Image (spheres, grey):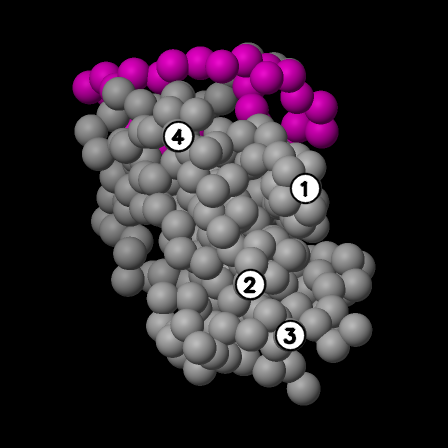
């Protein structure tokens, strides 16, 4: 049976004397962003999802969750009210320095990302942690891990931001945070292979700054098609994939070996 430290496996809740690396299979760090997600979802949507996944991991494995800022790197929606942005340099340095210090506790780190613009910086930070501190690091962005499920469950034919998939997940996990009366179809995505549409198998990266305007809701997709049942299917597949990932890495029970 997996051993969970007192305080539910969260570093901030544990006395230092209880930190024994032999009891931990790996560490978990959740990261996201604070950015607009339309009129119906909270600014902290990305971080809330990553944090929830981390909590599910803590429940299933002998792990310790590291604290981290909910703020990430925001380019596309940086000019929208409420969106917070830190520099790429600051974000990468935070990941590396927290990881390097945490390596004293356990050398294996799973980074759960809820925001796509963080991903390239997380890969850079992971490489540095491996090279400079001898850690084993795995990074995933949740939507990328279940793209096939999002496409099969969702009825909408386009989605980039705050659309059917994310809203469904919120209706399942965080219904108290969804402003149902404000849900409506958003802007339709254009741009083909460079559109960042999750329904495309092949995509090119085209950084775009999207500014607020009187007619723009901040939604790029159709959240009106979302429901909790779809969210439950996405959640089930997501937790199953993460569990498979940990076992594929042979991290379950690593502390005992």
Circle 3 sits on which residue? 22
Q: CA distance from mark 3 to mark 2?
A: 9 Å
Q: Earlier in the sequence, mark 3 or mark 2?
A: 3
Seen in the image, is 15 located left or right of residue 106? left
Residue 218 horizontal side relative to residue 197, left or right: left
Give SS at disc 1.
Answer: helix
Report the number of numbered marks.
4
Which of the marked residues, 3 or 4, is nearer the chain's N terminus? 3
Judged by depth in the image, the label closer to the viewer, 3 or 4, is 3
Sequence-first disc among 4 and 1: 4
Report which quarter residue 86 is drawn in.
top left
Where residue 252 sits in the image (x, y, percent)?
72, 70
Q: For the point 72% across and 57% down, which residue is it?
A: 245
For disc 4, the marked residue is 90
Q: Main secondary structure of the magenta part?
A: loop
Q: Is residue 233 above or below residue 142?
A: below
81 lies left or right of 148: left
Spatial CA distance of label 1 from label 2 is: 15 Å
Q: Secondary structure at mark 3?
A: helix
| Secondary structure of residue under mark 2 | loop
| Residue 239 picture location, percent across and down | 61, 63
Counting from the top left corner in percent of width and height, residue 24 is at: 61, 71
Q: Residue at x 43, y 39 (%)?
A: 94
Position of the N terminus by quadrant: bottom right
The Cα–Cα distance between marks 4 and 1, rounded to whole angstroms, is 19 Å
Residue 249 makes an appearance in the image: yes
Residue range highlighted in magenta: 194-222
Say which quarter of the image contains residue 125.
top right
- Asked whether the beta carbons under mark 4 and mark 1 sit within 8 Å of each other, the answer is no
Which residue is under mark 1?
A: 130
Say which residue label 2 marks: 105
Q: Is 177 in front, or is 96?
A: 96
């Amino acid at each position: 049976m997996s051993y969970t430290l007192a305080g539910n496996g969260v570093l901030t809740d544990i006395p230092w004397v209880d930190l024994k690396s032999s009891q931990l299979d790996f560490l978990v760090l959740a990261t996201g962003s604070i950015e607009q997600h339309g009129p119906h979802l909270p600014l902290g949507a990305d971080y809330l999802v990553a944090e929830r996944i981390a909590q599910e991991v803590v429940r299933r494995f002998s792990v310790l969750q590291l604290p981290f800022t909910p703020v990430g790197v925001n380019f596309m929606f940086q000019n929208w009210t409420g969106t917070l942005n830190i520099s790429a340099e600051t974000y990468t340095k935070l990941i590396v320095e927290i990881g390097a210090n945490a390596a004293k506790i356990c050398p294996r780190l799973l980074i759960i990302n809820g925001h796509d613009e963080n991903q390239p910086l997380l890969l850079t930070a992971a490489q540095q942690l491996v090279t400079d501190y001898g850690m084993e690091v795995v990074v995933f962005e949740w939507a990328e891990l279940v793209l096939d499920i999002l496409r099969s469950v969702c009825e909408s034919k386009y989605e980039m931001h705050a659309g059917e998939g994310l809203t469904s997940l919120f209706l399942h996990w965080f219904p108290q945070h969804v402003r149902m009366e404000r849900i409506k179809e958003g802007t339709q995505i254009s741009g083909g292979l460079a559109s960042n549409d999750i329904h495309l198998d092949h995509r090119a990266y085209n950084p775009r700054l999207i500014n607020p305007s009187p007619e723009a809701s901040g939604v790029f997709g159709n959240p009106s098609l979302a429901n909790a049942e779809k969210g439950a299917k996405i959640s089930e597949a997501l937790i199953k994939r993460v569990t498979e990932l940990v076992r594929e890495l042979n991290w379950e029970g690593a502390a005992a070996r």
